[in-house]
Image (cartoon, rainbow, N blue to C red):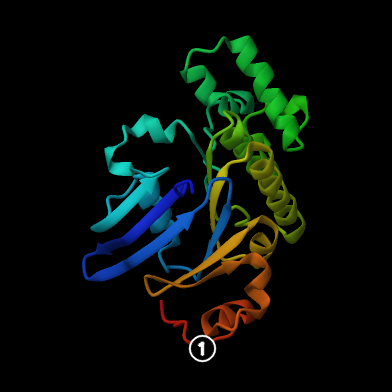
């Protein structure tokens, strides 16, 4: 049996007196799409940053394909990662094609080839070639999110991380982005972790779901089971209720 592509064991992170992660055990299989749900301030982004190495955990371990992430040279892992940031995080001073081809250009690819690849990748997320020479400020919010996804997948990463990918989008555009993420994961065969509080993202993107609350994973199961989990935490989250084990005081 192969090792999990991404695994955390007893992961802990505190900020002062605030314990954000309190012993997180996760295992994501190769090619699996895991969606981590939970309310605002429950530590979803902190978990993602600890896995990526942007934050140093206070305890526990992160393993990538069976190897300690701490023992990996940063580029040995990060060069295989695609990241879709919550706000897109496109470089304002660069045209869209240079945003998408940023990694290729960094690695010395000829600009003509890098631009051609960028246009091809933009096409995969539904953006026409004319988009390539526009600047991020000239794009709508939905187009910016598509361009950011194109950048995330341009180098065909083995790992794809998405931070609140539908934040700020209307329901129709959110549905488009969710489907593009799912299609990208399937096409690349990438191992993916998405964090969100959006149930439409869960239903479209997830193979499995983990609910994070109080610094711990309270439930984990297949996406198809989320509407009949039998777990009080999940039922409260799905219903959007202020009554249940999940505290509304955050």
* Quadrant assignment, res 69: top left
Q: Mark 1 sits on what residue?
A: 244
Q: In the image, what residue occupies the spot 40% across and 35% down?
A: 77
Residue pushed farthest bottom? 243
Q: In the image, what residue occupies the spot 54% across and 46% down?
A: 30
Mark 1 nearby-residue class (10 Å; few <14, some 14–19, many ≥20)? few
User: Which of the pair 43/71 is nearer the observer?
Assistant: 71
Can residue 24 be seen by looking at this rendering? Answer: yes
Vertically, is 159 above or below 177? Answer: above
Can residue 140 be seen by looking at this rendering? Answer: no
* Quadrant assignment, res 235: bottom right
Vertically, is 84 above or below 96? Answer: below
Residue 92 at x, y percent in the picture:
54, 33
Q: Secondary structure at mark 1?
A: loop
User: Which of the pair 182/143 is nearer the observer?
Assistant: 182
Residue 245 placement, left or right of 183 = left
Residue 242 at x, y percent in the picture:
54, 86
Instruction: Count how many numbered circles sit on residues in the image.
Output: 1
Image quadrant containing the C terminus:
bottom left
User: Which of the pair 184/17 is nearer the observer?
Assistant: 184
Residue 185 placement, left or right of 21 = right
Residue 228 at x, y percent in the picture:
66, 80
Residue 154 at x, y percent in the picture:
60, 30
């Amino acid at each position: 049996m192969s090792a999990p592509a991404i695994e955390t064991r007893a992961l802990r992170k505190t900020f002062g007196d605030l314990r954000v992660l309190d012993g997180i055990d996760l295992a994501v299989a190769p090619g699996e799409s895991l969606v981590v749900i939970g309310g605002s301030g429950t530590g979803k982004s902190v978990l993602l940053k600890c896995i990526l190495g942007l934050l140093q955990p206070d305890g526990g371990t992160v393993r990538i394909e069976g190897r300690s992430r701490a023992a990996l040279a940063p580029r040995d892992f990060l060069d295989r990662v695609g990241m879709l940031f919550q706000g897109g995080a496109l470089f304002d001073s660069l045209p869209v094609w240079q945003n998408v081809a940023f990694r290729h250009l960094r690695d010395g690819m000829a600009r003509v080839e890098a631009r051609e690849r960028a246009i091809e990748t933009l096409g995969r997320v539904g953006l026409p070639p004319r988009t390539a020479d526009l600047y991020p400020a000239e794009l709508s919010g939905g187009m910016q999110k598509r361009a950011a996804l194109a950048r995330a997948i341009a180098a065909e990463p083995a790992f794809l991380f998405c931070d609140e990918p539908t934040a700020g989008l209307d329901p129709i555009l959110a549905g488009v982005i969710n489907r593009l993420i799912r299609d990208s994961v399937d096409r690349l065969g990438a191992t993916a972790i998405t964090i969100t509080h959006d149930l439409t993202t869960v239903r479209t993107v997830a193979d499995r779901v983990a609910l994070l609350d109080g610094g711990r994973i309270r439930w984990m199961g297949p996406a198809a089971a989320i509407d009949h989990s039998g777990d009080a935490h999940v039922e409260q989250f799905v219903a959007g209720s202020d009554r249940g084990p999940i505290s509304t005081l955050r």
